[in-house]
């Protein structure tokens, strides 16, 4: 009787203190402008953003949490967008990355069951395969609760916070290993987030 009461109290406590699945903590938008192209802004979000386009800076970053940026018409001079979302799932914090401005974790994702062998390490290495940066936790966080990177195919250079020249000269590869000892080598400039899985 006491055990049953305690389990009910624990369940109630967890429901009251744990945020709901896919509760968004933070949304960040990064994009690059090509000033040589003419553009037209149709939405309030992009009109506000275009006020900062001074003709000097090409890359822009902003916290867009709570702003109405989804389902807007991206101006023609925006080369690419990178949307980073931090959210809760089952009491844990995960991150998602997408080049789709309308993406939201948990929406339109496959509910099929996935099997993946747990990742044991992920290292950015130099040309001689010498480990330079441990990105294991970052890869696990971005892989999401189903370890499928939210089915978003994003270039690794967008996942990593380094310029192309730095990736080319200092950090050209990523070496992944799983708990069964299988290894995989990826190119930081050519591969995608969906490649960060070892079958």
Image (cartoon, rainbow, N blue to C red):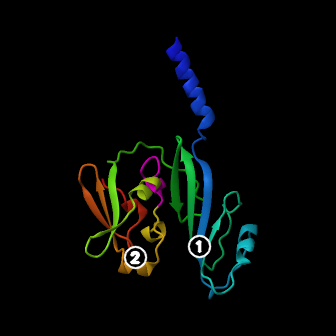
Region rendered in magenta:
142-152
Q: CA distance from mark 1 to mark 2?
A: 19 Å
Position of 17 relative to 105 (above/below): above
Using a 10 Å C-alpha cutoff, classify the residue at mark 2 as few (fewer than 14 neighbours), some (14 to 19) or many (20 or more): many
Position of 160 relative to 139 (above/below): below
Would you say 124 lies left or right of 95 here?
left
Residue 98 % position (x, y): 53, 62
What element does badge 1 sit on? strand
Residue 73 % position (x, y): 67, 69
Residue to which mark 1 is pinned? 31
Say which of 14 and 185 sits in front. Answer: 14
Residue at image coords 59%, 70%: 30
Residue to which mark 2 is pinned? 167
Does the magenta portion include 33? Answer: no
| 1 and 2 marks in contact (CB < 8 Å) | no
Q: Earlier in the sequence, mark 1 or mark 2?
A: 1
């Amino acid at each position: 009787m006491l055990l049953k009461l305690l389990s009910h109290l624990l369940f109630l406590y967890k429901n009251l203190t744990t945020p709901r699945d896919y509760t968004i903590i933070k949304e960040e938008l990064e994009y690059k402008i090509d000033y040589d192209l003419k553009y037209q802004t149709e939405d309030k979000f992009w009109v506000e953003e275009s006020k900062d386009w001074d003709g000097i800076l090409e890359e822009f970053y902003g916290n867009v949490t709570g702003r109405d940026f989804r389902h807007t018409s991206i101006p023609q001079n925006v080369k690419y967008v990178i949307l980073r979302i931090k959210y809760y799932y089952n009491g844990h914090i995960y991150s998602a990355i997408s080049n789709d401005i309308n993406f939201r974790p948990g929406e339109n994702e496959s509910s099929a069951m996935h099997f993946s062998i747990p990742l044991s390490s992920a290292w950015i290495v130099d040309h001689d395969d010498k480990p330079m940066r441990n990105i294991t936790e970052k890869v696990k966080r971005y892989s999401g609760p189903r370890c499928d990177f939210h089915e978003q195919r994003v270039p690794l250079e967008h996942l990593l916070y380094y310029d192309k020249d730095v990736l080319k000269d200092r950090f050209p590869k990523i070496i992944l290993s799983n708990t069964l000892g299988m290894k995989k080598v990826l190119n930081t400039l050519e591969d995608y987030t969906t490649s960060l899985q070892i079958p």
